[in-house]
Image (tube, helix red, strand yellow):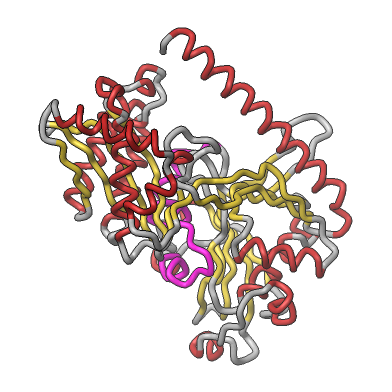
Amino acid sequence: MAAVPILEEVSGGPSGAMLTHLAGVPSISPDPSHLESLEGPKADRRLAIYPASAGFDLVEELEHLCARSIEPNVFFNPRFLAPAMPRLEDREIRLAVIRDGDEERSRLRLLVPLSVEKAPMPLGVPIMRTWSNPFGPLGTPLIDRDDPVGVIEDCFTMLGRKHLQLPRVFVMPEVRLDGPFANILRSFASSRDLTLVTTNEIDRPFLESDLDPDDYLREAVRSHHLREYRRQRRRLQEQGPVEYHVARTPDDVRLGVETFLTLEAAGWKGRERTAMAIDRFRAAFAREAVYRLAERDLCRVHTLSVGGKPIACLIVFIENGVAYTWKTAYDEAYSGYSPGAQLMLDVTRTHLDDPNIDATDSCAVPDHPIMSRLWMERRKVGTLVIGLTPEADRAARQAASQLHMYRETRNFARILRNRVRNLIGR
């Protein structure tokens, strides 16, 4: 049965061509089939908001959108997104899409998974928020490459209509600030006199280089760290044959996921009851999402073994030339050999040699002890807060201030927690 939207709103039609030059987005010739679908009096551009469960019904359309998006985001691929919704979120997540055409013929042009949230504190600001969390640390919407400026303009214009009674502020966490979407949004906000605030900005480690792997590592990693990693590798080889394996076929990926879940549950996350295998919902999500991505050759599991025993494991997603180092775990009995870093050295070489990978997003927090040391590229990632009407200026700035305060409080708690762990030896 076809998915039924909770809400549907009609635009005045495709627009935005005048903003294309301002946004610095190259002019793209529209798809002829798209132009044909827009001919006639019934053609419309529509905003539709679906329940999260509709992700399973929209898989085919969303996969087509993923292949045509101006900026990839594997965490909004329906093979990841649909399994995540019922298992990771207590919040009610909706799928907002823009669709061109009519009831007989249409095409998705945009996807934004979002939640509508009440003010987090007295006198606070209610918001709409793009879905982003530690399991999907990227909030960039999927936008079709045909008329991306017009699609964004129509989306935010319709969301801001008063009769819909939606919050006047839209929050987009963990967006690449130098990407096409952010550039278009800035131009749109400027042209409409809308407040757009950037907050919670970080430098995320990226791997993006044309250098030979050995040359890259010599340039990126300090010489004394490289010497130490080589020494640890030699010591590790004394324990047995060291093997590095990349699982790619669906069957091999299934085995690799179980290796990851076992290693993670045996470590400190298992002791703190935060390992994915301990929570049946998270474990079910991880297995289904990884299996479904592997069916489309969008997942790899990298494993480092000693004497046939896995000691480190990393799950990687790959889509449209961008790789994402998603989740990693290691055997703490081998911590003296830096198994996580040893595996990442192998992964770095593999990704630099792979012609199908243009860049790798570490998905890591700032100053990550391994990724920040091994990779020298950085990409600006932050939260964009936009007021949907000119009158929402104060509300947008207040929401941005609240988000910044919340992040600073969480960072302080994280630092304090890590210090306590170190004191008690975890």
Q: Relative to the observer, which residue lies in front, 214 or 194?
A: 214
Q: Is residue 363 magenta?
A: no
| Residue shown at the point (40%, 64%) measured from the top left | 321
**Residue 258 sits in quarter:** top left
Q: Relative to the observer, which residue lies in front, 97 or 31?
A: 31
| Residue shown at the point (11%, 35%) measured from the top left | 241
How many numbered marks are there? 0
**Residue 255 sits in quarter:** top left
- Main secondary-structure element of the magenta-colored stretch: helix
- The percent position of residue 323, horizontal first and vertical second, equals 39, 55
In the rendered structure, the answer to whether residue 46 lies left or right of residue 404 reads left
For the N terminus, the quadrant is: bottom left
Q: Is residue 249 visible?
A: yes
- The percent position of residue 289, horizontal first and vertical second, equals 35, 48
For the C terminus, the quadrant is: top left
| Residue shown at the point (80%, 65%) measured from the top left | 190
Q: Is residue 87 magenta?
A: yes
Q: Which residue is outermost to the top?
A: 424
In the rendered structure, the answer to whether residue 260 lies left or right of residue 179 reads left
Please provide the residue range marked out in magenta: 62-90
In the rendered structure, the answer to whether residue 63 lies left or right of residue 155 reads left
Q: Is residue 292 visible?
A: no
| Residue shown at the point (39%, 67%) measured from the top left | 60
**Residue 201 sits in quarter:** top right
